[in-house]
Amino acid sequence: MMLIERVDVLRAAVRHVKARHPFDIVAWVVLPEHLHAIWSLPPDDADFSTRWMLIKAGFSRRVERVEPIGLSRLRKGERGLWQRRFWEHQIRNAEDLQRHIDYVHINPVKHGHVERASEWSWSSIHHYIRTGLLTVDWAGAPFAIGSDAGRDD
């Protein structure tokens, strides 16, 4: 819950890192216990790791220590807010990009937080709606991830 309860701190950490290590946010969603992001980095710059490390550290330094911490993390002086690694994927083409943007935006529905992606406050879907790229009812209820709904066979 800390990520959405303290989303203002997360946004500040992102702004701080973007000012020093530029990147564009293509899509982003913040959920109670994790987040998904698609970034575009400057040409000849593939350093996602530094950016994530700085965002995580900036957020962690500014929020209270209330999360449970395992012994392994305690010994290393780590917080229990973040997983140690992140999953990185280089977008291959326009279709791949669209699939990943859709995945980011549908995540709150997939996790049962809302019935319609546009109902989730902490998502870049609202930018896509404002600019006319998506409608408010995009992927609206009823929606089932991995269902056979809509198949013709």
Image (tube, grey):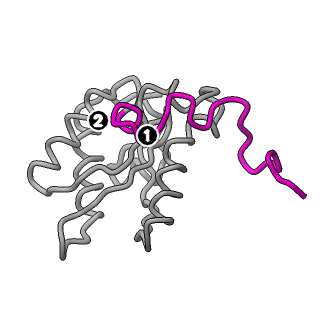
Residue at (43, 71) in percent of width and height: 93
Mark 2 surroundings within 10 Å by alpha-carbon count, few (fewer than 14), some (14 through 19), many (20 or more): many
Frontmost residue, 56 versus 28: 28
Residue range highlighted in magenta: 127-153
Q: Residues within 10 Å of mark 1 (few under 14, many from 20)?
A: many
Q: Residue 130 appears at what percent x and percent y?
A: 35, 31
Which SS class for mark 2?
Answer: helix
Q: Are marks 2 and 1 in contact (CB under 8 Å)?
A: no
Give whichever of 64, 90 is nearer the camera.
90
36 in relation to 64, above or below: below
**Mark 2 → mark 1, Cα distance in angstroms:** 12 Å
Q: Amino acid at mark 1?
A: Val
Viewer-side residue, 81 vs 6: 6
Q: Which residue is mark 2?
A: 10
Instruction: Please tell me which residue is depicted at 29% across the width and 64% down the height of the picture.
Output: 49
- State yes or no: residue 143 in magenta: yes
The secondary structure that dominates the magenta segment is: loop
Q: Quadrant of residue 124?
A: top left
| Three-letter code for the amino acid on which mark 2 is drawn | Leu
Give the x, y percent position of residue 7: 33, 29
Residue holding disc 1: 29
Left or right: 138, with 121 as reference point = right
Name which residue lies at 33% across and 36% down: 131
Residue 122: x percent and y percent?
A: 41, 30
Vertical order, 15 against 32 (above or below):
below
| Nearest to the observer: residue 34 or residue 26 | 26
Tell whether position 126 is magenta: no
Foreground mark, 2 or 1, reads 1
Task: Residue at 42%, 51% (x, y): give it.
Answer: 73
Residue 90 vs 135, above or below: the answer is: below
The single residue placed furthest to the bottom in the displayed view is 44
